[in-house]
Image (cartoon, grey):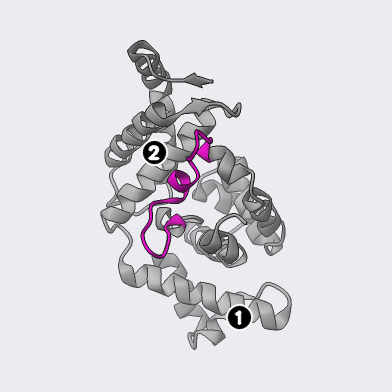
């Protein structure tokens, strides 16, 4: 079993992966409000990278960079949450949207339309779309989604037992396949948007040009797509692996 222990090994990994931290920070910054500073994300990401270096054990063949990305992003999201960058009211609004989507999905047997979600929330379509716009930056998975109800640590640490690789603990569940299936079941426009954003790495303006809509409309659709995915993944997010 290989463990990163030597000072030289740690310094080498730190230097090698600094560009990764900056790249992830700029990618995350692109979908956050202007008030969020990219330097703050980089600083949090460096802490996540150091944490990954100190914890990593290659006893299941997982690549270090794959594990590091998980830790870096987690540290950035944790920093954003602790900085209260998204108002509590906004998070509560998105929980209402997710609940409405879940209930409609169960009743209709298909993804509900924007108009149907708005009606369920007793909002006009314009007010619903404005709520989506105000909730830009809503994430598929929040760090606290993996906290036990009794506050007993986070998901990664709970599965880092007996020298087990916590990344493997995540990937060995059906969570990854559930994400793939949830994206596949999105309405066509939202599925296209997610592909352009996460696979092709286009920014919102570029996606708007492809889809023939405004950048603000792309932001609304992205937020709605994330809410749909969180609704579909509710069981996996809150109960963890079987």
On the image, the x and y values in percent for residue 129 come to 49, 73
Q: Closer to the observer: label 2 or label 1?
A: 1
Callout count: 2
Q: In terms of image quadrants, where is residue 239?
A: bottom right
**Residue 175: % across, % down:** 62, 52
Residue at disc 1, secondary structure: helix
Residue 64 highlighted magenta (yes or no): no
Disc number at residue 59?
none
The answer to whether residue 115 is seen in the rendering is: no
Crowding at dot 2, Cα within 10 Å, few <14 / some 14-19 / many 20+, comes out as: many
Q: Which residues are magenta?
A: 146-166
Residue receiving disc 1: 103
Question: Is 155 left, or right, of 38 in this rendering?
Answer: right
Seen in the picture, residue 6 relative to 81 is either above or below; the reply is above
The residue at the point 32 percent across, 68 percent down is 88
Main SS of residues in magenta: loop
Residue that label 2 marks: 25
Label 2 to label 1, Cα distance in Å?
Answer: 35 Å
Q: Nearer the viewer, residue 173 or 115?
A: 173
Residue that extends furthest to the front in the rendered view of this protein? 162
Q: Which residue shows up at 50% across the image and 75% down it?
A: 97
From the image, which quarter does the N terminus lie in? top right
Q: Looking at the image, which is closer to me, 152 or 114?
A: 152
- Can residue 239 be seen here? The reply is yes
Residue under the point 43% across and 42% down: 73
Q: Quadrant of the C terminus?
A: bottom right
**Can you say whether 49 is above or below 214 in the image?**
above
């Amino acid at each position: 079993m290989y463990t990163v222990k030597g000072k030289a090994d740690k310094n080498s990994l730190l230097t090698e992966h600094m560009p990764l931290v900056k790249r992830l920070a700029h990618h995350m910054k692109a979908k956050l409000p202007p008030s969020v500073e990219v330097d703050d994300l980089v600083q949090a990401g460096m802490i996540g990278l150091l944490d990954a270096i100190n914890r990593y054990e290659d006893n299941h063949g997982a690549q270090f960079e794959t594990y590091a990305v998980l830790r870096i992003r987690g540290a950035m999201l944790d920093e954003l949450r602790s900085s209260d960058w998204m108002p509590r009211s906004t998070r509560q609004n998105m929980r209402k949207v997710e609940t409405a989507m879940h209930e409609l999905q169960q009743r209709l047997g298909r993804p509900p339309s924007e108009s149907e979600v708005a009606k369920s929330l007793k909002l006009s379509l314009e007010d619903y779309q404005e709520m989506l716009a105000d909730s830009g930056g809503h994430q598929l998975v929040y760090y606290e989604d993996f906290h036990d109800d009794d506050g007993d640590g986070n998901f990664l640490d709970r599965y880092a037992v007996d020298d087990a690789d916590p990344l493997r603990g995540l990937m060995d569940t059906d969570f990854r396949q559930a994400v793939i299936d949830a994206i596949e079941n999105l309405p066509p426009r939202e599925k296209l948007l997610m592909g352009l954003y996460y696979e092709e790495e286009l920014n919102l303006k570029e996606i708007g040009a492809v889809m023939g809509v405004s950048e603000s409309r792309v932001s609304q659709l992205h937020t709605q797509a994330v809410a749909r995915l969180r609704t579909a993944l509710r069981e996996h997010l809150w109960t963890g692996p079987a």
